[in-house]
Image (spheres, rainbow, N blue to C red):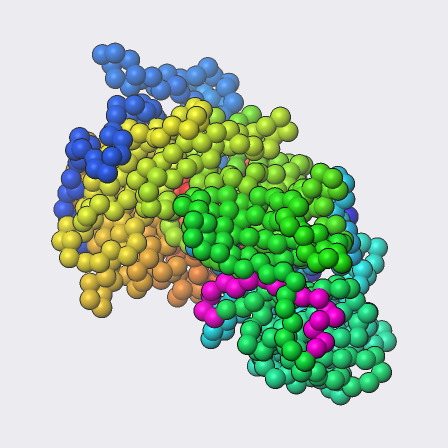
């Protein structure tokens, strides 16, 4: 298998940029520059651990792990509660291996209760990346599509992953009896944007794939270019390109075969040809003007008729090889269509309704579409209301079979199901087989018609891009393989096991001096795996695996939520290990090893609950081990728009915040105190420019607040007041930053995930946050960060990158251990 990185090669050369001074060891905590200023009026919060709860939820108990002061977060001591002495930290034997939380030491061992390593010197490393394909979307009220998939032959599929919208990663894979085998991979510098029409609210991309045959495919990038790729020898090669005007209309669809292909935008279909030396040319003499805006294209098997799905019916166009096109009268002119496909005998089309409503899928005989009157469909998969609310989302035409993907909701249970029907002279059969793709009790993704892909015996079902196979008498089955699925969550499991986890994907990761490698895995998690999930971390205790979507924390929907528990199986990959239930949503969630923290709004307060996570999951409802109320905004006169939290195990403290509006003004109100209610709370208010919290972090007496992806505030406590040590507008730096999350924080160094100027991770010292000290560029948005040995690992939806950070006088410490908001565990 040959690997290309195309446009990405130019970025990895500048993977690590040392931009300032300071040693890799901890910075001193005194002598901080700058004047501290008051973050707002102080007011203590209200301890409420003993108040009764409402709504029939479990009341706090005395269960759970030892009180936080007994957990010193030191790998070289064993913390014990001794009668009459309280918490005692007993040193482990000298020579016990440990981790001193410094990537610039090696041979770490315990000495007299402390972890010590031998300093090493290392030049800046370069980013090494392993890629995935068919990455899944984050399921939290977002558009469903995460990428592309098209079959170029009966057993080869080309996946397109959008790299956060900033690029296109293409992976050619073969579907076989043993699963899904990746053959080659290439990255194109084509951004992938979504289409949004005035009334057409369906989800679709304006960058897409047009297969011409088993050896060639066209990539269409709206307002960018059309590029021809060769697939000979199972390798992806660039052949030619044609630049498109940056002010041109949105290109919505394409279809082709051999030397000819067509694309459409608005009322016009553009004809293209592949000429000598693979040159791409527009054939202006064979352009087609339509009676209504185009939405999709399909070409008949013999290649002589182009069917155009429009906003006002289906339009057949004769496209002879040696003559001009002939537009014939439209049929079904009262309907709009999203997607269509044809085979030798049938045309199948998805009806498109206005403003996001979902229509049905109809099957027509091609011969009956030639008449003067509208045909009657052979079969219609119509919407259903009532006890089971059902909508047909998409379809795929296979050899003698039609697959239809359904969304069905009954009560709180939502299911995505693919059903198989036989196609033959008598029409469409009843359901012959079905396969569950997804089952959940949450809102999940926004609903939209979906463009499934299929050829021969195989199909790719959106939006998770799971690969389906007709297994003969065994019915429908799933195929997967190495590199298939998201790599967003870097997860260090017990026994030195390193994993990369996504919504359905689980991969075992190997590290070498050169690059990370995927050793085993694929989209192996079952369809009823919940979005909220727990798995054992390094020390064996359960923690939250789920990655935040668009807010500061993982979000729990309203009511009680099921949490799937996962555990490494015999092959090291995560597999189901039961469920637990979490009451009290809607809420923001944060976890530390063995504990889960839940912050939910209660009248004018925010309720923080701490739950002890069990050693095994047997379906029980979690019971809070402690609970208290915080009042970041005691006035209660403002409208709360968002809320979030950060916790620190070593201090037993929590930082909670809420974004609110007061007329035309926006503010962030914050409260900082112990979660067990044992001490007074410090509060304060910051001005804001948006009504959402980007990220919060807490470590070693300092708090970070990131607002509107650019305003970074460093806070400290002064009695019952929060004081602002410094604030910096990251968008006004010499190299402006757009920050999406705080990846790690240890009180001195913070690692930030950036979208601008490039995707990547940037390190800043909070004493001088306007002077970033290191940067690693990545091909896609970074979602998690972890450190294993000398490797800094950056998890993304479509890739996993590693780098060996520099070890010299300018190197920043890479935080790890317990001082991390969401990522390191």
Q: Nearer the viewer, residue 390 or 639?
A: 390
Q: What percent of the width, then of the height, locates residue 634?
A: 15, 50
The quarter of the picture where residue 9 lies is bottom right
Q: What percent of the width, then of the height, locates residue 771?
A: 42, 57
Q: Is residue 138 visible?
A: no
Query: Residue sitting at 43 percent across and 53 percent down?
Result: 386
Q: What percent of the width, then of the height, locates residue 89?
A: 34, 19
The quarter of the picture where residue 45 lies is top left
Query: Residue sitting at 17 percent across and 30 percent down?
Result: 50
Magenta part of the chain: 354-371
**Quadrant placement of the C terminus:** top left
Q: Nearer the viewer, residue 281 or 373?
A: 373
73 sits left or right of 778 in the view:
left
82 sits left or right of 191 in the view:
left
Q: What percent of the width, then of the height, locates residue 286?
A: 75, 85
Residue 370 part of the magenta segment: yes
Above or below, 246 against 435 in this view is: below
Query: Residue sitting at 71 percent across and 71 percent down?
Result: 368
Q: Is residue 596 visible?
A: yes
Specify the farthest residue to the bottom.
Answer: 285
Residue 305 part of the magenta segment: no
Above or below, 140 against 207 in this view is: above
Q: Nearer the viewer, residue 478 or 351?
A: 351
Marker count (numbered): 0
Above or below, 610 against 343 in this view is: above
Above or below, 797 against 663 in this view is: above
């Amino acid at each position: 298998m040959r690997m290309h990185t195309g446009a990405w090669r130019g970025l990895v050369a500048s993977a690590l940029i040392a931009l300032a001074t300071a040693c890799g060891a901890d910075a001193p905590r005194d002598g901080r520059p700058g004047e501290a200023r008051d973050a707002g009026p102080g007011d203590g919060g209200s301890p409420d651990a003993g108040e009764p709860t409402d709504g029939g939820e479990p009341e706090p108990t005395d269960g759970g792990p030892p009180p936080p002061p007994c957990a010193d977060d030191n790998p070289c001591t064993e913390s014990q509660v001794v009668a009459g002495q309280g918490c005692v930290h007993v040193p482990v034997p000298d020579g016990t291996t440990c981790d001193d939380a410094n990537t610039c030491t090696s041979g770490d061992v315990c000495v007299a209760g402390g972890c010590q390593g031998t300093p090493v010197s290392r030049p800046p490393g370069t980013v090494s990346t392993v890629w995935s394909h068919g990455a899944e979307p984050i399921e939290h009220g977002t558009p469903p599509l995460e990428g592309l998939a098209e079959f170029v032959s009966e057993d080869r599929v080309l996946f397109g992953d959008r790299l956060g919208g900033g690029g296109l990663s293409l992976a050619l894979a073969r579907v076989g009896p043993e699963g899904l085998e990746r053959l080659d991979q290439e990255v194109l510098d084509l951004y992938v944007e979504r289409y949004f029409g005035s009334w057409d609210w369906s989800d679709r991309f304006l960058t897409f794939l047009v297969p011409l045959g088993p050896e060639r495919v066209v990539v269409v990038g709206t307002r960018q270019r059309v590029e021809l790729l060769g697939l000979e020898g199972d390798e992806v090669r660039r052949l030619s390109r044609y630049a498109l005007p940056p002010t041109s209309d949105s290109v919505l669809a394409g279809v082709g075969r051999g030397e000819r292909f067509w694309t459409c935008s608005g009322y016009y279909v553009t004809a293209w040809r592949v000429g000598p030396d693979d040159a791409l040319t527009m054939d202006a003499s064979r352009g087609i003007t339509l009676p209504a805006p185009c939405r999709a294209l399909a070409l008949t098997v013999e290649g002589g008729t182009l069917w155009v799905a429009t906003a006002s019916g289906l339009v057949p166009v004769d496209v002879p090889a040696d003559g001009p096109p002939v537009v014939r009268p439209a049929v079904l002119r009262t309907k709009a269509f999203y997607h269509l496909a044809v085979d030798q005998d049938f045309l199948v089309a998805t009806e498109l309704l206005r403003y996001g409503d979902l229509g049905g899928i109809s099957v027509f005989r091609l011969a009956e579409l030639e008449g003067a009157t509208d045909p009657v469909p052979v079969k219609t998969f119509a919407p259903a209301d009532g006890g089971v609310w059902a909508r047909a989302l998409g379809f795929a035409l296979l050899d003698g079979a039609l697959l239809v993907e359904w969304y069905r909701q009954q009560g709180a249970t939502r299911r995505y199901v693919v059903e198989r029907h036989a196609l033959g002279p008598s029409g469409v059969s009843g359901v012959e087989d079905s396969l569950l793709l997804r089952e959940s009790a949450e809102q999940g993704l926004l609903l939209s018609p979906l463009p499934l892909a299929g050829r021969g015996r195989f199909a790719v079902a959106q939006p998770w891009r799971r690969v389906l196979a007709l297994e003969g008498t065994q019915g429908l089955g799933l195929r997967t393989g190495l590199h298939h699925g998201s790599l967003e969550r870097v997860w260090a499991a017990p026994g030195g096991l390193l994993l990369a986890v996504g919504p359905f994907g689980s991969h075992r990761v190997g590290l070498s001096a050169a690059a990370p490698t995927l050793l085993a895995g694929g989209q192996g998690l079952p369809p009823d795996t919940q979005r909220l999930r727990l798995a054992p971390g390094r020390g064996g205790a359960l923690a939250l695996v789920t990655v935040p979507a668009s807010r500061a924390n993982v979000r729990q929907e309203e009511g009680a939520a099921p949490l799937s528990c996962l555990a490494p199986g015999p092959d090291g990959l995560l597999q189901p290990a039961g469920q637990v239930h979490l009451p009290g949503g809607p809420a923001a969630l944060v976890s530390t090893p063995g504990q889960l923290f839940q912050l939910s709004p209660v009248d004018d307060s925010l309720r923080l609950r701490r739950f002890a996570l069990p050693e095994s999951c047997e379906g029980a409802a979690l019971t809070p081990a402690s609970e208290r109320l915080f009042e970041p905004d005691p006035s209660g006169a403002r409208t709360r728009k968002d809320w979030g939290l950060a916790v620190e195990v070593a201090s037993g403290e929590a930082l909670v915040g809420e974004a609110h509006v007061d007329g035309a003004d926006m503010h962030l109100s914050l409260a900082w105190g112990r979660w067990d209610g044992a001490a007074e709370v410090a509060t304060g208010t910051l001005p804001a420019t948006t009504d959402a919290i980007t990220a919060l972090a807490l470590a070693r007496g300092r708090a970070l607040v990131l607002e509107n992806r650019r305003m970074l505030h460093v806070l400290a406590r002064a009695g019952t007041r929060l004081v602002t040590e410094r604030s910096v507008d990251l968008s006004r730096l010499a190299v402006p930053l757009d920050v999406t999350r705080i990846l790690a924080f240890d009180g001195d160094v913070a690692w930030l995930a950036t979208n601008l100027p490039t995707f990547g991770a940037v390190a800043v010292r909070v004493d001088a946050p306007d002077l970033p000290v290191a940067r690693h560029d990545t091909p896609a948005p970074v979602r998690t960060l972890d450190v294993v040995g000398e490797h800094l690992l950056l998890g993304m939806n479509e890739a996993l990158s590693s780098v060996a950070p520099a070890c010299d006088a300018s190197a920043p410490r890479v935080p790890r251990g317990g001082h991390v908001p969401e990522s390191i565990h």
